[in-house]
Amino acid sequence: MKYFFTLIFLLLISRQLLAQYPPVDQAVQTIRNAKTPAEKFRGYRGLDRYCYTTGLYDSSAILQKKMYAIAGGLKNDSLMVLVYRAIGNRLVTRTDYNFALSAYFKGLDYAKTDESKATFYGNLAYVYAITGNDKVALSYLRKFESFGNFPSSAFFKNILYGLVFNNLNKPDSALIYLQKAASSANKNNDPTLVSISLAQSGKAYELKGDADLAEVYYKRVVAYCKKQNLASGQIRHGSLYCDFCIKSGNYAQAKAIALENLAVAKKAGITEGMSTVAEILRKVYAHEMNKDSAYYYAVMQIEYKDSVSSQKRIAEFQNLTFGQQLREIDEQAKTAEAAEQRKQNIQYALIALGIITIIILFLMASRSMITNTKMIEFLGVLALLIVFEFINLLVHPFLERVTHHSPVLMLLALVCIAALLVPLHHRLEKWTTKKLVIKNKAVRLAAAKRTIEKLERINE
């Protein structure tokens, strides 16, 4: 909790940051003014999107756990779909592709509408495409299309086809889909997707041999990532531009972009990005015959590759821990729900027991009503069952802790409780029946006296 409020505090005092990324301010205001859990969820989601796209992965994980708790508490599958998509997106940004796939597959379990299912298949296709598994990516893209055409997902789908066909070295096919994506773009599109669209357009023109248009798109995507504060996107797409510049012999431009990207990677703490940029700078300085600088960046590249390997292991541990924390949130929610249900059941049992007790007392206290002992026996048995269930509800959590959820031990404990209650019930039943017999005799005697007196008055 304290980490989250620290994050909010930092975001609130950073005027420059809010000016650069207005949705952050909107998200913070939504969280502050939220009157329902669903509204708070929307605020967390907006803030989370900013965090994982700018490299604030720890803060993103905290926000996603809060989103998960709200979605689980509301039992809302639609919100759970958004949570797992956000988790998958964060992991993709971190290049934790295996865990990202797990998150997307888990999200499919909650997807109820064709549109949400289609989007998850698109997410899966993207992961396979950027990891070079183009055949698998195409199979998931076909599943994506099998659910129908949705205006909200047309932009995403066309970008994915463009990416896959670029991977397959089919730029003409890629451009057909990328141009469709451009025609369906709007201001509400996810900035990350927009950046991928621009970068893949540049890549397609590069593959076609149209260097001028390729450079136009590469420049546009770098400028767009800077404007949207997409650190990982700027590094990834900027590296594509650098490779293009090196192939074109424009080492000066590649050097300028790479040095800028290196500063961004260091600031955002994107280790893998620093390794990629260091490799580009090594090539640039090697071309300039600057051996010292080339050696410096070669060492940096090796160090950061080792660091990436180490961080991958740490990230894997963190992702496993994150998954366990989500399960703990589920368990806590289930425990709280069970406790609330138990509390309600205890109240219902008390109400039922009170009603039956009042009925028995009324029947016993009534001076004019002849009571059937069979009815009292039935009510007594019913009261016994309610009392037993009431005691069971009260002691069940205690028995679970003491017996460590052992069914045999819990059964023995409940049998012992029943063994105490049954004799007590028999004594009470015997006492009640005796009292009722006495009362019934008195009622009959009183009725007989009244009848005799009435007859005597008639005879007189």
Image (cartoon, rainbow, N blue to C red):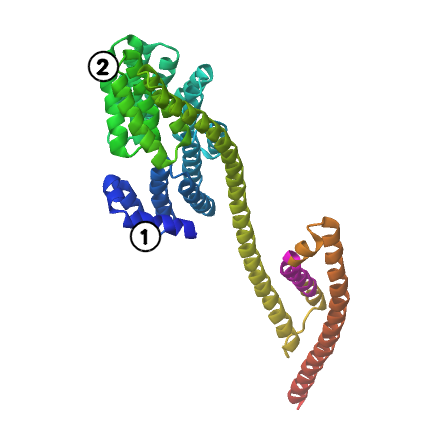
Q: Any mark on residue 402, and which?
A: none
Look at the numbered disc 2 and give the secondary structure of its residue: helix
Q: Nearer the viewer, residue 243 or 333?
A: 243
Q: Residue 276 location, x and y as percent?
A: 39, 24
Classify residue 459 by image quadrant. bottom right
Residue type at tag 2: Leu
* Disc 2 residue crowd, few under 14, some 14–19, many 20+, Cα 10 Å: some
Q: Nearer the viewer, residue 152 or 166?
A: 166
Pointer 2 or 1: first along the chain = 1
Residue with the mark numbered 1: 32
Q: Residue 424 location, x and y as percent?
A: 75, 68
Please, is residue 380 above or below residue 190 in the view? below
Q: Residue 18 location, x and y as percent?
A: 26, 44
Please, is residue 27 above or below residue 120 in the view? below
Figure quadrant of the C terminus = bottom right
| Magenta-tinted stretch | 380-397
- Report the mark closest to the observer, 2 or 1: 2
Q: Any mark on residue 213, and which?
A: 2
Q: Residue 4 location, x and y as percent?
A: 40, 49
Name the residue rendered at 35%, 14% in the picture: 166
Please, is residue 440 above or below residue 226 in the view? below
Does the magenta portion include 231? Answer: no
Does the magenta portion include 386? Answer: yes
For the question of whether residue 119 can be seen, the reply is no
Name the residue rendered at 27%, 12% in the picture: 249
Residue type at tag 1: Arg
Please, is residue 290 above or below residue 447 in the view? above
Residue 238 vs residue 353: left or right? left
For the question of whether residue 301 can be seen, the reply is yes
What is the CA distance from the residue labelled 2 to the residue labelled 1? 46 Å
The main secondary structure of the magenta stretch is helix
